[in-house]
Image: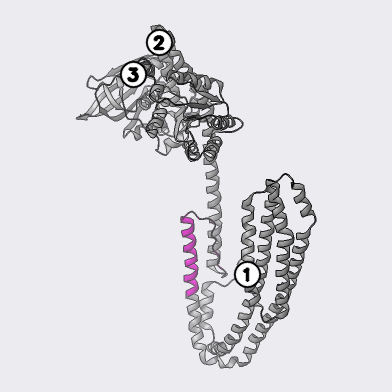
Amino acid sequence: MPNHGLSFKKKIIMGAMLPIVMLCIISSVFYISLQRQAETTRWVEHTHKVIAEAHHLIKLLVDMETGERGFLITGTNHFLEPFNKGIVLWNKSMPLLKVLVLDNAEQVRKLDEIELLQKKWLTEAANIEISTRKLVENSTEVTIDDVRILIENETGKNIIDKIRWLKDAFVLVEENLLVLRLKEQKKSAENTLVIIVLGTLFGSVLSGLFVFYLSKSIIGNLNKLMAGVKYIESGNFSHSININAKDEFQRLGSAFNQMRDTLEKSINTMESAVQSKGDFLANMSHEIRTPMNGVLGMLTLLEDTQLDDEQHEYIENIRLCGDGLMVVINDILDISKLEAGRLHLETLPFDLRKTIKECCYLLDVQASNKRLNISTIIDNKVPDTLIGDKLRIRQILLNILNNAIKFTDKGTIYLSVKVESHIADQYLLSFTIVDQGIGISPEDQLKLFKPFSQVDNSITRKYGGTGLGLIICAKLIKQMNGEISVESEKGKGTTFTFHLPLTKTESIIKKSTAQRISRLSSEVKLSDIYPIKILLAEDNNINQVIAKKLFQKLGYSIDLAKNGIEAITAVYENKYDMVFMDMQMPSMDGVTATKAIIKEQPQNHPYIVAMTANVLPQDRKKCFDAGMEYFVGKPVKIEDIIKAIEHYGDRES
């Protein structure tokens, strides 16, 4: 839309050419005009204030009426807060308004009548209705129908309608006075033209003031623009830049506001996308982990049955596969954390040679099906036991080896590990995986470490895959303070090399979960150490069976609740030391149930532990915000239960 305002250039030219004589004439009437207009302005401001105070009284009346209606409908006392507050403010505002119109007896009379009507409304309608509503909660003789009858009598409505009518009449008088005073102001300005000739003596001063006005206008508008920039910088998009001058600054301000709106819309869209992603990850976490909890839980129970050596070996391999699958699931669900560099890494002793052997075993069937060999060469200087994240290192090896098998049709895949350097117990290890597959061109190598990328769309159709594997590997290696590189030639194969700094430690023979429980059983059960009563809130039947068996191993006979409502009832009827609470349950979820239990028993409520498949950071926060004191994620391991009980025991001691 075209802007017909004057530009700064034209304003400056006009200021320079403004006749000095006209400036002097205008300035000569300044004092007289100022005095008259100041008096008129005071009256105008006074009238505006009277009108505003009158509207404020009606707003207070509306607040009182709204609070009263809310209480009558719900019976909730907090609705009476605006009602009581409105009465106090009314009693303060009415005397002030009377003082403002003290010179007008008729207006004072109207206010007196309004004040009497307001008191009448309180005594004859509002207070009676409120008292009756309170009796509904405390007496069987008074019902909500009695309250409805009082309302239908419209006693209060008729009084308030009359108050509004009197207010409108009051405001109309003030508005008429405002019109008269504005006319007086206009007349005063016209009279000043009679003596305008006196302003010629001060024309030169006015010229200087005009120049000053221009410069001040520039600085003022620049300050508005800078203030707008600071608001945007702080993340506040509600601030608009309003420049009334129809010049370049006005257009600049409008353009800035448009940019702000566009930026706010983009940020809202981005935040919405992030929220949707978080909701998706939370749902996927629960839906995937719940069946995995059943699989791995039943496997744990199977370990304690009568098995021969071959069956033990099968179970161990199944567990290795399950653990590997959980690593993949966790990485997919926590990809946002990985991209942000906030993924937690374990620092525990592990056997690197055994880890590599496990990787080769897991991929043996896949390689054999393609008639491929996997050859491993491990430097003798590599320590037997290192400190690091075994599962993450295994994930990296599995990912790269799996890719090598996928893209190789014949030959051998080589995995070698050697010591690049070491100082004392600090070792820098080099891992090299070489295949004889299809190879990668130099330009396609640039796509390898980008999310959801593969070197060619046809590869996705032929070989499958999400394209997340190598980016996850690269970020994990980077988080371990390592680096990864690739060398490849089309049609001749690919070599991946990554370096990891690891620390040597003494050999540690870790006991399995089954061994630990066996030791506990042979010596003393955990229930003997911590003789407590436990309730489990879990709706899934399989998870109930698994959890019950795990607790039985520790010597506990637990009670079960299928949902949050049953859990609350059980806690009220029994004295429990600990409650293991699932998050997602029918009828009432675990978070709501926890809040209800703590609200009912704020001082002596049981120690509540979250046991859930919702394991994302926002899920943990919800649990702890609700009052839960420990968190166990699914799939549940018996060691997690032991840690939770020990944590409770440490707190009690």
Q: Which mark is residue 312?
A: 2
Rendered-image quadrant of the N terminus: bottom right
Of labels 3 and 1, the one closer to you? 1
Indicate which disc residue 511 carries.
Answer: 3
Q: Amino acid at mark 3?
A: Lys
Name above or below for residue 453 compared with residue 155.
above
Q: Which residues are magenta?
A: 216-243
Q: In which quadrant is the C terminus drawn? A: top left
Few, some or many C-alpha atoms within 10 Å of disc 3 (few <14, some 14-19, many ≥20)?
A: few
Q: Residue at x 52, y 22 (%)?
A: 543
- Real-space Cα distance between discs 3 and 2? 15 Å
The numbered disc on residue 47 is none
Residue 646 rendering spot, x and y as whole percentages = 39, 28
Q: CA distance from mark 3 to mark 1?
A: 78 Å
Type of amino acid under label 2: His
The answer to whether residue 218 is magenta is: yes
Q: Using the image as rendered, state which of residue 355 and residue 242 is in the foreground.
A: 355
